[in-house]
Amino acid sequence: MTFRLGFFGPFFIDTSYFLVQLFAFEAIYGHVDKIRGWGHGEILVFVGTFSLINALNMIKLKKFRYAD
């Protein structure tokens, strides 16, 4: 049971964090067209790229943390 929680817990938290970011930007861009020249599509690419880099970084750190 601990193994499942250790796997699904961070997955659920990261997915929730990603969805909160998307909903926040959807709410913001529902009222404006651009923010400092950044349109809706550009922000989605930025958030997606950030999330991908963050996930890869977490995988790398986890690999080295448990490499005893």
Image (spheres, helix red, strand yellow):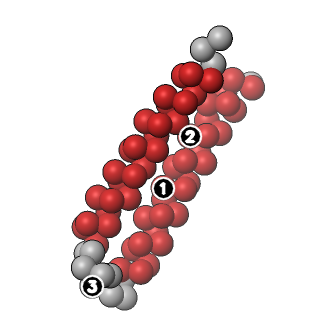
Q: Which mark is residue 33?
A: 3
The residue at which mark 1 appears reads as: 18
Mark closest to the chain's N terminus, 3 or 1: 1
Which residue corresponds to the image point at 42% horizontal and 49% vertical from the top-left?
51
Q: Is residue 9 left or right of residue 43?
A: right
Instruction: Decide which of 51, 16 is in the foreground and name it.
Output: 51
Which residue corresponds to the image point at 41% horizontal and 80% vertical from the top-left?
28
Pointer 2 local density, CA inside 10 Å: few below 14, some 14–19, many at least 20: few
In this rendering, is residue 41 above or below 66? below
Pointer 3 local density, CA inside 10 Å: few below 14, some 14–19, many at least 20: few
Which residue corresponds to the image point at 32% horizontal and 67% vertical from the top-left?
43
Residue 30 location (% of width, % of height): 36, 83
Instruction: Decide which of 13, 42 is in the foreground and name it.
Output: 42
Disc nearest the viewer among 3 and 2: 3
Question: What secondary structure is marked by label 3?
Answer: loop
**Residue type pointed to by label 1:** Phe
**Residue type pointed to by label 3:** Asp
In this rendering, is residue 2 above or below 35? above
To which quarter of the image does residue 42 belong? bottom left
The residue at which mark 2 appears reads as: 11
Q: Tell me whether circle 3 and circle 1 mark residues in contact (CB < 8 Å).
A: no
